[in-house]
Image (cartoon, helix red, strand yellow):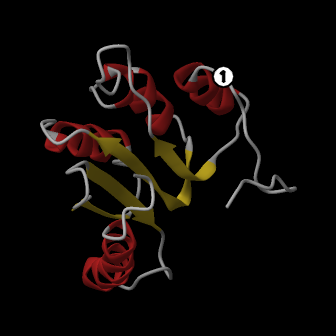
Amino acid sequence: MGFSPCDRIGVAIKDGIDFALRATAEGRSYHAVLIDAYDASGEVPSAFWQPNEGLAKALARGLLANVGLVAGNFLPHMDISIALRTWRDALQHSRQSLAFSVEDTCVGNQIAVHAVGESGVARCNAELEEKLRLHADSLVAFMQTCPFD
């Protein structure tokens, strides 16, 4: 395994919130926003999941493309409903969206996902939900092998 950058995928080692806000100021958007960040106390910084904080502002300003998802890795004790509500509210301009979570059965972490789509991607929320649940089940199956011990 490893990471191989290419024309469409790269790595930026920067403050995530600063990067997101700068991207929206420059008119850039992304199909995936993945959050796997923790502060010194082991918590996901509030700037990534609280209302009116950095990520919510960037999402509201267009950080996420018309078709895409925001996903965050949260510790088991975290109430992820706050993050999902924050992301939903910030993405209220999206026509179709679906939020769900998947539990990592190895360590108990919760993966919160908020996906958005535009007309033609899914005819209705039920179809979008079915497609996302199909992939979520694949993720759960992979996570049960726990390759990161």
Q: Position of residue 137 (x, y in %)?
A: 31, 78
Which of 138 and 28 lies nearest the eye of the viewer?
138
Q: Is residue 107 left or right of residue 44?
A: left
Residue appearing at x 50%, y 82% in the figure: 120
Q: Position of residue 91 (x, y in %)?
A: 38, 46
Give the total of numbered labels. Answer: 1
20 vs 118: above or below: above
Residue appearing at x 39%, y 31% in the figure: 56
Q: Quadrant of residue 29?
A: top right
Which of 121 and 39 lies nearest the eye of the viewer?
39
Q: Is residue 19 left or right of residue 76?
A: right
- Look at the numbered disc 1 and give the secondary structure of its residue: loop
Disc 1: CA contacts within 10 A as few (<14), some (14-19) or many (>=20)? few
The residue positioned farthest toward the right in the image shown: 7
70 vs 132: above or below: above
Q: Quadrant of residue 6?
A: bottom right
Residue appearing at x 40%, y 72% in the figure: 142
Q: Position of residue 23 (x, y in %)?
A: 67, 31
Q: Amino acid at mark 1?
A: Lys
Task: Please identify the quadrant where the N terminus is shown.
Answer: bottom right
Q: Position of residue 15 (x, y in %)?
A: 59, 20
The residue positioned farthest toward the top in the image shown: 40
Q: Is residue 61 left or right of residue 14?
A: left
The residue labelled by disc 1 is 14
56 vs 4: above or below: above
Q: Is residue 115 left or right of residue 63?
A: left
